[in-house]
Amino acid sequence: MGRHAGLSRVVENFCLETVRKRWSQRKAEESYGITGDDLTKVPWSAPALEKEWRAAHAERFPWFDENKLSSRVPKEACRMRAAGFANYLKSRQGTRKGPRVGFPSWRKRKHGSRFRYDADRAKPVAPRTVRLPAIGDVAVCEDMYWLTSRIATGQARILAATIREQAGRWWISFQIEVDRDDTNQRHQADTEAPACGIDLGLKTFAVIRNDDGSREEIHAPKPLKAAQRALRRANRKLARAVENSNNWAKARRRVAALHLRVADRRRDFLHKATTRLTRTKSAIAVETLNVNGMVKTAGLPAPSPMPGSASSSASSATRPTGTARTSGRPTAGSPARRRAGTAAGSTVPWFSRTGPECVPDAACCTTVTTTQQATSSPRCSPPQALDMRTLAGKFPGEEKRLVETA
């Protein structure tokens, strides 16, 4: 199976190399003034890429015939590359839904080992045995009686099969077309079951509100937090092992197995939660919430308080005279020193003082225009004369200008 995974990777890279060379040649010909049918054709489709592979593999990759590898693997590899090119072109033209897709890149061994069979070339021949072309019968750990029984009665049909290696284990997944009428009838929710709305969150995975007024919270497990201790130990062993040695390979598989266990626990939780909801609720409404965006902004610090606010005054009152807001001692004549000017005989900076000694009037009042407040707030000027340019933009949320009132 490892050889077929390497074959699939080689064919995908061959298709990418062929398309890049033909596309560069076509662009060069267009710069020379060549047009129409005289331009080099780029093999974008799967049949064209498969034709290029059949013409080149005998000379460039003679080991393909020598090792008697399956011919269905290159066929599916060409299809996957053609699908990647089609998605890129549609995304570039704006006809593809979803996020933008870039041009396909080279496939490397670190990206994972996988290959595909088309149709029912790979199929189960027993509840615990699958037959793979050019490989033979392979035993599996999971009982597949539910699939073999439906194939025997004509209720299921295999469309494709994917074999993938993860954390030292090989997995096979079948793409099938199955008649689920009997299954849906058995698992159909009761007509008198309550309808519900689901509110997704960050600390609480989901809050369910039923139409009868009852409320339920679903708390997600934290498998990554539970595996941190084992991951730290496994990563230390991996970092101390000699690269490409046997111990390094063992430590690498151990780290991969831990990450796979975390992913499996998350997938198991989602599967059980969604299955329970679909079997116990007559209707489900879920909000269209950008959870990824909420996660990205959840860890941002709170905005700094504006000068003159309660939090700003409290923090400024504990600061000795002449010190700045930043760490370290400001030098004489620096903006931090000029910003920390205080009234005579007081230890509180001028912008945080309140009381009758700081009553704004027409002679000593400026208006600080901010971007966080819809209206301007008055600030008392310091008793000493200060250049207005030294104050502009020094406070959080301030624009780079101050407006003085007459």
Image: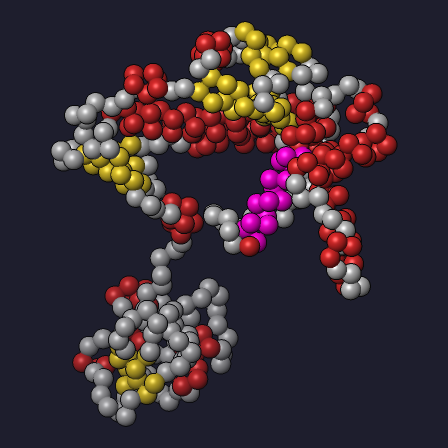
Q: In the shown orientation, is residue 352 left or right of residue 271?
A: left
Q: Which color scheme is applied?
A: secondary structure
Q: Quadrant of residue 206?
A: top left
Overall secondary structure of the magenta section: helix
User: In the image, is residue 81 part of the stretch drawn in magenta?
Assistant: yes
User: In the image, is residue 176 part of the stretch drawn in magenta?
Assistant: no
Residue visible at 70% across and 16% down?
134
Q: Which stretch appears magenta?
A: 78-92
Q: In the shown orientation, is residue 21 left or right of residue 286?
A: right
Q: Is residue 78 visible in the rendered structure shown here?
A: yes
The residue lying toward the viewer, choosing from 174 and 34, is: 34
The residue lying toward the viewer, choosing from 143 and 183, is: 183
Q: In the shown orientation, is residue 312 left or right of residue 130?
A: left
The image position of residue 303, as x and y in percent, is 36, 61
> Compared with residue 386, is residue 112 higher up or lower down, i.e. above or below?
above
Residue lying at the far top of the rendered structure: 126
> Compared with residue 183, is residue 304 higher up or lower down, i.e. above or below?
below
Residue lying at the far right of the rendered structure: 59
The image position of residue 329, as x and y in percent, is 48, 69
If the image is split into quadrants, where does the C terminus sit?
bottom left
The residue lying toward the viewer, choosing from 186 and 324, is: 186
> Compared with residue 145, is residue 28 higher up or lower down, i.e. above or below?
below
The image position of residue 355, as x and y in percent, is 19, 77
Residue lying at the far front of the rendered structure: 37
Q: Quadrant of residue 339?
A: bottom left
